[in-house]
Image (cartoon, helix red, strand yellow):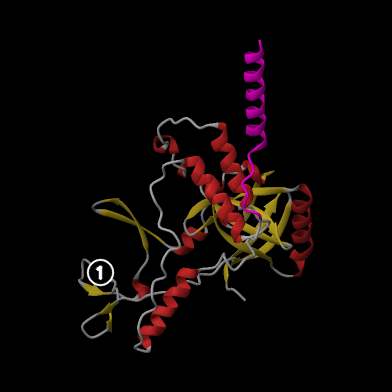
Amino acid sequence: MPRTIWSGAISFGLVTVPIRVASATENRSIQFHQYHLADMGRVRVRKVCELEDREVSQGEIGKGYEWSKDQVVPISDAELRELPLPTAKAIEIQAFVPLDSIDPIQIAEGYYLVPDGQVAAKPYKLLTQALGRSSKVAVAKYAWSGRERLGLLRVRDDVIVLHAMRWPDEIRDPAELLPPPVELSDDEIEGALALMDSMSRDDLDDPEFRDTYTEALAKVIEAKREDRELPEVPEPAKQPGQLVDLMSALQESVKEAKASRGEDTEVQVPKKTAAKKTAAKKAVRKFRSS
C-alpha cells in the first residue's frame, strides 16, 4: 500500500471527511546515479555550510527566506504546518464545475484520497456518489509543502482523486507562439477529420501504449552487464520527407491507419466535398445549355 503523504480532511459546506493522501501514480522509469568513470566510484552531492566550510548533517538543515543579503529569516516545518489558513489542515472545496470548463494544461499530478477511519466512511461515500451523479468535479484549495494550491477532485472507481492544479496566472499566454496566418481548404480540413476518425479508439488499453523507451534501455543495460553486443537500432519503416502536398499526405496517412487495423484502405471523398463537386458540375452544364 502506498505511504501516506498528508492527512487532514475534505471540507464542503458543513460536511467534513477525514482523509489520508496517497500518490495515485508511480515512476517506472529506470533511474541512473552519477559515477567517476575512471574507477566507477559513486559520485555524491554533499551538503556543505558556506560559512563554516564543513559538511552538515540533515538534522542541522532547515528552511529560510533570504530577506536581504545580510538577513535570512528561518522558517520551521512546524510553523509551515500552523499557517493561519483554513487550507493548512483541510482541502476546502470552493465550487463544483463541469470538467470540460477546466483547461487540461492546468491539471497536474494526481493523488488518491483515502477515508481515514470508520467515521469517514459515510461522508466519503456521500461525496463520491454526489460527484458521480452530478457529472461535475470539485475545485478546492489546500496547502502543502509551504504553499497554497488549487486542486480538482473527481471520482475514479469509487475513489476520490485529487489533481494538483496550476493557478490561472501560472499559465503562459500562447499568443506569441501562434504560427503566421495561412489558408486552409475545406478538403484539407475534411481530410484531417477523416484521419482522426481512422485513428479513433474507445480507450488506451492497448500494447501500443507502453513505455518502449524503458524497455529498450533495460535491454541495453542487460547486454552491457553480460558483455554482449548492444541491440541493433531498428530501421524506420519510412523516412519522413519534405511535406509538399498536404492533401496527399492526409490521404496516405488515412490509408496507413486503416491498413494497420485490417480495414478497407480506399479513401472516401468527404460528403461535403462530393456535394460541392456535384453542384459545380450541374452549374457548368446549366451554363453551357443556356
Q: Position of residue 213 (x, y in %)?
A: 45, 69
Is 89 on the left or on the right of 66, as rendered?
Answer: right
**Can see residue 126?**
yes
Screen quadrant of the N terminus: bottom right
Residue plotted at (24% across, 52% down): 69
Name above or below for residue 165 compared with residue 3: above
Residue at the limit of the structure toward the top, as seen here: 290
**Main secondary structure of the magenta stretch:** helix
Picture layout, residue 184 above or below residue 129:
above
Q: Is residue 289 left or right of residue 176?
A: right
Q: Is residue 85 visible?
A: no
Q: Could you say where residue 183 lies in the image, as x and y percent from the top left?
A: 47, 30
In the displayed image of the protein, which residue is found farthest to the bottom? 226
Residue 12 versus residue 288 in the image, above or below: below
Question: Residue 76 appears in which quarter of the rendering?
Answer: bottom left
Residue shown at 36%/80% (left/top)? 230
**Residue 19, image x, y percentages:** 66, 64
Quadrant of image for the C terminus: top right
Residue under the image location 51 percent in, 51 percent down: 148
Which residue position holds label 1? Answer: 49
How many badges with numbers are in the image? Answer: 1
SS assignment at label 1: strand
Residue 124 spot, x, y in % from top left: 74, 60
Magenta stretch containing residue 14, yes or no? no
The amino acid on which the numbered mark 1 sits, given as a three-letter code, is Cys
Q: Residue at x 64, y 65 (%)?
A: 205
Between 105 and 283, the one nearer to me in the picture: 283
Q: Nearer the viewer, residue 62 or 37?
A: 37
Q: Is residue 289 magenta?
A: yes
Q: Which residues are magenta?
A: 264-290
